[in-house]
Amino acid sequence: TFTWNIMIRAHAQNGAPSDAIFLYNLMLHRHVPPDKFTFPFVIKACLLCHAIDKGKEVHGYAIKVGLGWDFYMQNTLMDMCFKCGDMEYGRKVFDKMRVRNIVSWTTVVSGLVACGDLVGAHEVFESMSARNVVSWTAMINGYAKNERPYEAFEFFRRMQMEQVRPNEFTLVSLLVACTELGSLSLGTWIHNFALKNGFEISVHLGTALIDMYSKCGSLDDAIVVFDKMPRRNLATWNAMITSLGVHGRGREALELFGEMEKVNVRPDEITFIALLCACVHEFLVYEAYGYFKYMTKHYGIAPMVEHYGCMVEIFCRAGMLDEAYELVKSMDVEPD
RNA sequence: UCCAAGAUCGGUC
């Protein structure tokens, strides 16, 4: 059973959730008894496959073998229900739980947030007897993502009054709220707060800072953050390239792309949207077409409607209406 | 061996 668990977990966590479910089926077929560790892995795999019915079936089986009481299994099941959009069933599982821990409550809060039910999430949140940093961050993130930045900060204030220390996730959510507000001063305050409290400028925090500074109008601060970051990932590079392009520094955006390739970060479709946008701003028709072709030829990325949109725009601005029309006719995606 | 929260995807309308 131990070995089966390891294998199921490995597949569930490495982008092969259907193989994990297959292994589970095989396990039962060979009469290997699953234990309490098996079920959360399998249900997680069901979540990743959006196989909500299979997840419910696994749950039923867990109950049958007497493991229906397990926190981990029940919490994972709830998480699956909410993330697959089945709010009612998620709540039903929660209501039926005889004992709940803080993770159960927080899972419901973040599940309702994921379903867009901020009112319901808030209600559950207020009825919690204890809240940790994850519970608070789930609410803050919900408000930040749903264009309610003031409430995000109101919860942050309450959280501090209750002496709960924010973590990196909290700060990233607050930066999203700052970006929403367009408030450079508040964003800078969060940045200083992070530095004062000993937070490393990690990949996530750094990328959120670059995005915030750029969208709040301070490209220079974004560049400083980018240059200081000890580690960067694809998203970091995309954020910086996008920012340069948006601020009319398209040439530098293209140069930065060259650096990105030099350090062997593989660009994605978003990188090329950023590059084509940079070309649009600088009227670089020839370069844009070069990148458009290069994207597919060198990286095997199929152009999306956004890429075509950039190309059409740049052709039109250059007065090359025939080229624009030809391109639209050749599209293999639906025009928007 | 197990559970919950986070970032980049433009301009325009």
Image: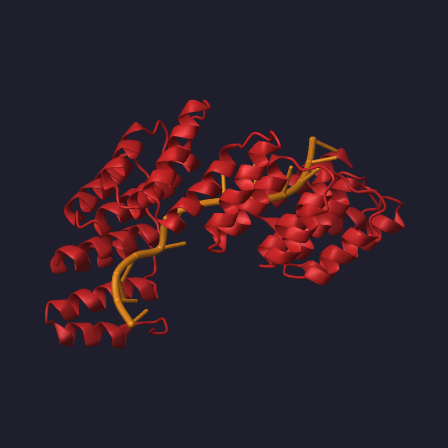
Residue A93, x across and y down, in percent: 78, 54
Tally of marks: 0
Q: Quadrant of residue A102?
A: top right
Left or right of residue A229: residue A75: right
Residue A39 visible in the shown view: no
Quarter of the picture holding the C terminus of chain A: bottom left
- According to the image, what is the colour scheme of the structure? by chain
Left or right of residue A46: residue A211: left
- The image shows residue A158, relative to residue A269, as above or below, that is above
Residue at 35% of width from left, 50% of height from top?
A268
Chain B: its colour in the image is: orange
Residue A253, x across and y down, in percent: 21, 45
Q: Nearer the viewer, residue A108 or A291?
A: A108
Q: In which quarter of the image is residue A321?
A: bottom left
- The image shows residue A312, relative to residue A299, as above or below, that is below
Residue at 42% of width from left, 42% of height from top?
A175
Q: Which of A120 and A259 is in front in this view?
A: A120
- The image shows residue A247, relative to residue A158, as above or below, that is below
Left or right of residue A139: residue A41: right
Residue at 42% of width from left, 31% of height from top?
A202
- The image shows residue A12, relative to residue A84, as above or below, that is above
Quarter of the picture holding the N terminus of chain A: top right
Q: The red chain is which one?
A: A
Residue at 34% of width from left, 63% of height from top?
A304
Residue B6, x across and y down, in percent: 50, 44
